[in-house]
Image (spheres, rainbow, N blue to C red):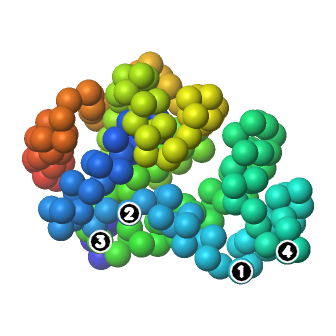
Amino acid sequence: MMRSKKIAITGGIGSGKSEFLAILRKKGLPAFSCDEISRALMGEKDYRAGLCDLFPACSERGELDKKRLAELVFSDGDALAKLNAYSHPKIMKALLAEMEKFPLSFAEVPLLYEGGYAPLFDKVIALVRTESDRIAGVMVRDSLSEEAVRLRMASQIDAKSLRGRDCILVENDGTLSDLEKRADEILTLLQSDG
């Protein structure tokens, strides 16, 4: 049986991971998102119950208050670590099971290096973008204040650290058309790589 080749797409919040994933999907490639898997898990009663048990202050009559949970974890490093320890193994298990079905697949993994998951993938594509563009984009996209965006950014690897990693670096400071061209170059590189 042929071993599947798994490619991770990572980068900080607002770096363009979702746009890159959409480009791959438009090309008909199997491309998955940890955020989408996380949302699907939130739809499971047992998963939500586990979060309510871990974060009783974010639970109202047995139902999880997701907004309150987000405010807590992005302002409290210990709470964020507790959430990640609970959710990440479940998300990664579901993700890798899906990817295993394809000879080549891609996955958007926001906390790839922070969670120590890079060794599970054959290659990593890392998107970087100027901090000001990331903040402005996320403020508009998620209706968040600059302070809220900066709190989320503080829990992620920074662009300087990504530049020192063994990955395919994508400078995403241009247009969507520029990003599409870069995606084509990377796909050609991956295909020639076997």
Q: Earlier in the sequence, mark 3 or mark 4?
A: 4
For badge 4, the amino acid type reads Gly
The answer for how far apart the CA atoms under marks 2 and 3 are is: 12 Å
The amino acid type found where label 3 is placed reads: Phe
The residue positioned 43% from the left and 40% from the top of the image is 140
Q: Earlier in the sequence, mark 4 or mark 1?
A: 1
Residue in the image at 12% along x and 41% along y: 177
Q: Is residue 106 above or below residue 193?
A: below
Q: Which residue is mark 2?
A: 32
Query: Which label's residue is closer to the chain start, 3 or 1?
Result: 1
| Type of amino acid under label 2 | Phe
On the question of residue 45 being in view, the answer is yes
Q: Are marks 2 and 4 in contact (CB under 8 Å)?
A: no
Kindly identify which residue carries mark 4. Answer: 62
Mark toward the start of the polypeptide (2 vs 3): 2
Mark earlier in primary sequence (2, 1): 2
Q: Nearer the viewer, mark 3 or mark 4?
A: 4
Q: Is residue 165 above or below residue 59?
A: above
